[in-house]
Image: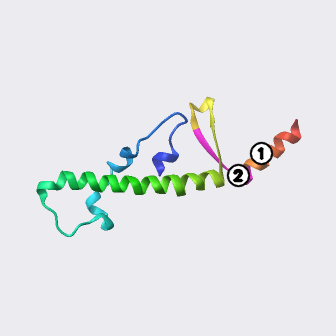
Amino acid sequence: MKDFVEMKRFENQKMEDYIVKMDVFSIPWLEEDKFSYKFRGVIIKKRRKLLAEVVCFIMNKLVIPFVRMNFYVTDKHQENRKIFYYRKPLWVLVIKLTMQRL
């Protein structure tokens, strides 16, 4: 989540960037009772694929809609394309004050 929020405007990250950092054997709901170490690579690949689907769902259905609903997201050219998050009530206040000054 931290990496996602700290991204700059034109940066992209693949789901694999998040999944590779995770230990699929430490996630209880991905565990199998017994497996052969001969097929460890195949098992890791399958678990990472399943984990990628779950993380993708969480990001697309929960995190991004939450951010869109609660924050106004913008960037500043002076800040080297850094993304800024403003709570919507605060942003509305800023807009109102700006419009009054015009």
- Neighbourhood count class around disc 2 (C-alpha, 10 Å): few under 14, some 14–19, many 20 upward: some
- Neighbourhood count class around disc 1 (C-alpha, 10 Å): few under 14, some 14–19, many 20 upward: few
| 39 vs 30: above or below | above
Which residue is drawn at the image coordinates 29% and 56% (left, top)?
47
**Residue 37 lies in quadrant:** bottom left
- Percent from the top left, x then y, of residue 68? 62, 51
- Residue 44 or 8: which is nearer the viewer? 44
Q: Main secondary structure of the magenta part?
A: strand
66 relative position to 92: left or right: left
Looking at the rendering, the stretch of residues picked out in magenta corresponds to: 83-90
Q: What label sits on residue 58 in the rendered view?
A: none
Amino acid type, mark 2: Lys
- Residue 36 or 18: which is nearer the viewer? 36
Amino acid type, mark 1: Val
**SS of the residue under disc 1:** helix
Q: Are marks 1 and 2 in contact (CB under 8 Å)?
A: no
| Residue wearing tag 2 | 88
1 relative position to 9: left or right: left
**SS of the residue under disc 2:** helix
29 relative position to 37: left or right: right
| Residue wearing tag 1 | 94
